Amino acid sequence: SQMEVSTLAVKPTKGEVFFEMWDNQTGENLLSHQQPNIITLDAGILAAIVLTDPLARTNGINMLAVGSGATGALLSPDAPDPKQRKLNAEISRKAFSSTVFRDGSGNAVSYPTNVVDYTTVFGEAEAVGPLNEMGLLSTISNNPNVTNPNPNSFPTRNTTVDLSDYDILVNYITFSVITKPSTATLAITWRITY
């Protein structure tokens, strides 16, 4: 009955991002940081597409994008908004280097669970510059150089646009500017609990 359904404890999807950056020449740890993210409203559209017709879209969440377009102050950017549909100034995107399921204790397991770590590693020549925004994407192309961004820019959100032919931004965060030098490696793990 409706009464039974409404009393069920439903935990919302949540995400947490872990940053690690080190200098490849000296081995010095340049950054170790973690913070929560927001789930975008378009994540619900992706879920509806995939659950209704799994063959309608080739990719689920498959890439991480970083950029320099967060609004607000460099050290205190504006909070992310769930209406965000793409990065404001994307610098680089890359497929995951690993996808790992985790059990309730945080251990890596070989079977599907509701906790997934999506890790992307940007090497020395990749994603160089000042970074202050990032997001997980479901892309049309598996080639990170081929982008199909949503034509609607934040803060407007036109839900009459069919997202079938566009990359979908699923998670988004803004953060104090991180400058990635060309001598460093940046590893980002985005943990989603469904």
Image (cartoon, rainbow, N blue to C red):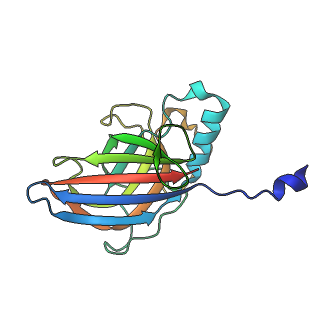
Residue 71 image point, x, y percent: 39, 67
Residue 7 vs 52, above or below: the answer is: below
Single out the residue that lies furthest toward the top. Answer: 55
Residue 147 placement, left or right of 54: left
Task: Say which of 59 and 42 sits in front.
Answer: 59
Q: Is residue 118 above or below residue 111?
A: below
Residue visible at 51% across and 52% down?
Answer: 192
For image coordinates 30% across by 36% down, the residue present is: 145
- In the rendered structure, the answer to whether residue 185 lies left or right of residue 117 reads left
Residue drawn at x 30%, y 65% as measured from the top left:
32
Question: Can residue 96 be seen by looking at this rendering?
Answer: no
The x, y position of residue 58, in whole percent, is 49, 28
Residue situated furthest left in the rendering: 25
- Residue 110 horizontal side relative to residue 144, left or right: right
Give residue 55's quadrant in the image: top right
Give x and y (percent) for residue 148: 41, 37
User: Would you say residue 189 is visible in this rendering?
Assistant: yes
Q: Nearer the viewer, residue 16 or 50?
A: 16
Q: How many marks?
A: 0
- Asked whether 52 or 2 is in front, the reply is 2
Residue at figure coordinates x 40%, y 31% from the top left? 141
